[in-house]
Image (spheres, rainbow, N blue to C red):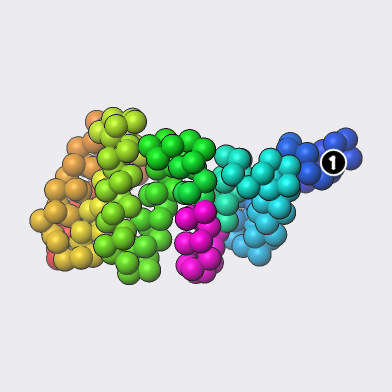
Amino acid sequence: MYMRALQGYEEALRSKHIPTLQTVNNLGLLYADLGKLGEAEKMHMRALRGKEETLGPKHTSTLDTVNNLGILYKSQGKLAEAEKMYIRALQGKEEALGPKHTLTLQTVNNLGILYKNQGKLGEAEQMYMRALQGYKEALGPKHTSTLNTVGNLGILYKNQGNLGEAEKMFIRALQGYEEALGPKHTSTLQTVNNLGILYKN
């Protein structure tokens, strides 16, 4: 379907028209989901170049593609490239949307995950705390985005050996997920599992 849409848009519009580029971006996301990371990178790079020319480097749609590239590079283990993409997306979103917009906070959270994977636990904690504060203000303490960040902090504290703080975060996330999603939702159960691992440790 995406290929059919892409061919049609290229014929009817042009290769750098926004619906064309959005379809290219969608193909990149699909290829990433299918594990075709090389093809995904080609699509995201094509979408990025087109959006930079058509919309400019700081347009939110361009920055979404920059963020997608960061996610892709992280999946490929290219952590330095992922960090560059996330920082670029973050700076652009801060300028375009403000530091407390949920799309900005999403990139802040992504940077936290990346820093955790790089072993930069202090930087990861700063990003998670910033995302948590922003999500609480923008969405409330029981929104799933807030709770995801609480869970991320729990994992970080566990990795730091701060088991008491980790327990607090996991219990907070668990109570929130049970209320928001129910006791049998996968996010609730993942948090139950995280608590089980923590108690074993």
Picture residue at 25% right of the left edge, 59% below the top: 156
Q: Is residue 201 left or right of residue 102?
A: left
Rendered location of residue 113, percent (x, y): 37, 57
Q: Amino acid at mark 1?
A: Arg
Magenta highlight on residue 60: no
Picture residue at 51% right of the left edge, 61% below the top: 84
Residue 67, can we see it? yes
Question: In the figure, residue 125 lies in which quadrant?
Answer: bottom left
The overriding secondary structure of the stretch rendered in magenta is helix
Q: Which residue is mark 1?
A: 14
Q: Residues within 10 Å of mark 1 (few under 14, many from 20)?
A: some
The C terminus sits in image quarter: bottom left
Can you name the residue that lies furthest to the right here? 11
> Count the marks: how many?
1
Rendered location of residue 91, percent (x, y): 48, 49
Q: Is residue 145 left or right of residue 29?
A: left
- Magenta residues, start to end: 70-88
